Image (spheres, rainbow, N blue to C red):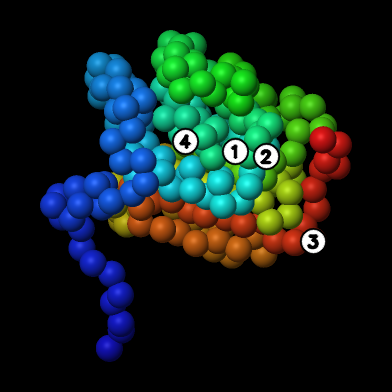
Amino acid sequence: MALQHYIRLDDALCAYVRNHHSGQGDPVFLDLREETMRLGAVAEMMIPEEEASLLSLLVGAMRVQRAIEIGTFTGASGLAIARGLTVGGKLLSLDRSEEWTRIARAFWGRAGLDDRIELRLGPALPSLEALEAEWSFDFAFVDADKTGYDAYYEALLPRMRPGGVIVFDNMLREGRILGRDLRRDPDTEAIARLNDKLREDSRIEGVLLPIADGIYLCRKKEGEASLPNRH
């Protein structure tokens, strides 16, 4: 008989989880969520409050100085990551929407994080490939177009320091990852392939966690090649 060490989360348990993390009820985050909800259905792309707390915790625990996020949206993940950076730390945020990132800029400013975040607009992969050679990272968060995740991974990994962490969001696709015919859903098919790839990739240590819509934590192994760091 297989051991099943998990619990099924209903709405009440999810609400309980969301009420038990540090910084619960942060006014900047809550106001950002309210502003984002005005955008309509796309608001579902905003990360939940407990995931934001996890990002801040990870970045702080790792004493991250250089971070990158692919997919800014209205700025919730950038807010969380920037808050966890060490003194003098920097987050590079890549997105292609001027409309959504205008909201992000406003709330980063309200939180006093302008000097910690550099926003670059444009398609993410060309932006990554055009980065100056001296850009290397301790932490990366990927929450953008799902069919691009694998390409972002391969572009990011050489720029991560040994021991650096990449976090991928939406890796369970609201349960659709178990669908029988993923060819009808290119985004979920791309995520399924990446989940399998990360499980077998000898360059990293990884774990898939059932937080929010599923996050994959990847730690670059010591000894893996990196671009020269001239910071």
What residue is disc 3 on?
223
47 relative position to 7: left or right: right
Q: Amino acid at mark 2?
A: Gln
What residue is disc 4 on?
80
Question: In front: 68, or 179?
Answer: 68
Whole-Å distance between the Cαs marked 2 and 4?
14 Å
Residue 17 image label: none
- Which residue is pictured at 13% across the width and 52% down the height? 12
Residue 65 image label: 2
Q: Earlier in the sequence, mark 4 or mark 3?
A: 4
Q: Is label 4 or label 3 in front?
A: 4
Give the residue furthest to the bottom.
1
What residue is disc 1 on?
85
- Which residue is pictured at 50% across the width and 62% down the height? 207
Q: Is label 3 or label 2 in front?
A: 2
Whole-Å distance between the Cαs marked 1 and 4?
9 Å
127 lies above or below 14? above
Residues tagged 1 and 2 counted as in contact (Cβ below 8 A):
yes
